[in-house]
Amino acid sequence: VDGNAVGDLGHGRLTFVGPERGAGLIWSGRFDTERLSGFASMTERLYYTDAYLREFDASVLERTNGGLRVYLDRTAFYPASGGQPFDLGVLGDSLVVDVVDEGDRIAHLLSKPLPAPRVTGRLDWARRFDHMQQHTGQHLLSALIADLFGHATVSVHFGADSSTLDLDTGALSAGRIV
């Protein structure tokens, strides 16, 4: 609602301004830098808003491990999670060899240091799309197994040549499935 406070960061007020006044957020007061210190290193996860994004631009926020581990302000690289493998691709001219979720930020492990303060990331789209299809198929198969046989999926693994589903049962016999 226009003019209503939407946040309090200790010494001020964050107010939403509606479309009739240009739409946006206005800060009034001073920032409590101690309470805000963690926000500077948060990574915007572009894969949540556009799973089909193949390329993006970002700023490097931090480099560690001799520049082989970088943190960006935003990323489309999906980290390993719940049996789904991490994305591969490139940041600038460096290969992305691993993507790690560290809570509020995403670490990109690289094949060589990344010197530039701004970078273009490009996903290995064939790999990402394959994982998306496997993930959708897994949810359908898991739902059918749960509905028809009463077994929940406890873990999954997506691979280039095969994928597996672990269920909360010892085994399903061919006679029970057919």
Image (tube, rainbow, N blue to C red):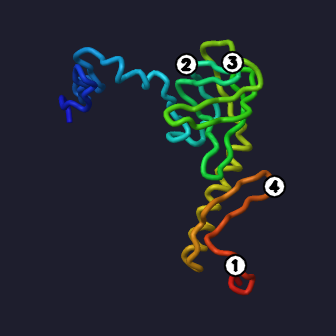
How far apart in space, not on screen, are marks 2 and 3 (Cα)?
12 Å
Say which of marks 3 and 4 sits in front.
Answer: 3
Q: Which residue is mark 1?
A: 172
Q: Residues within 10 Å of mark 2 (few under 14, many from 20)?
A: some
The CA distance from mark 3 to mark 4 is 33 Å
Image depth: mark 4 or mark 2 in front? 2
Mark 3 residue type: Gly
- Residue drawn at (72%, 33%), measured in percent from left and top? 89
Callout 2, which amino acid?
Leu
Residue 158 lies, with reference to residue 8, above or below; the image says: below
Mark 2, mark 3: which one is toward the viewer? 3
Residue wearing tag 4: 161
Circles 2 and 3, Cβ within 8 Å, touching? The answer is no
Q: CA distance from mark 4 to mark 1?
A: 22 Å
Report the amino acid beneath label 1: Leu
Circle 1 crowding by C-alpha within 10 Å: few under 14, some 14–19, many from 20: few
- Badge 4 or badge 1: first in the primary sequence: 4
- Percent position of residue 70, x then y: 63, 23
Q: CA distance from mark 4 to mark 2?
A: 36 Å
Per the image, the residue denoted by label 3 is: 67
- At x 58% / y 79%, what residue is drawn? 148
Q: Around disc 3, counting alpha carbons within 10 Å, would you say few (fewer than 14), some (14 to 19), or many (20 or more)?
A: some
Residue holding disc 2: 61
The vertical placement of 154 against 9, above or below, is below
Extreme residue in the left direction: 3
Residue furthest bottom in the image: 175
| Camera-nearest residue between 63 and 50 | 63
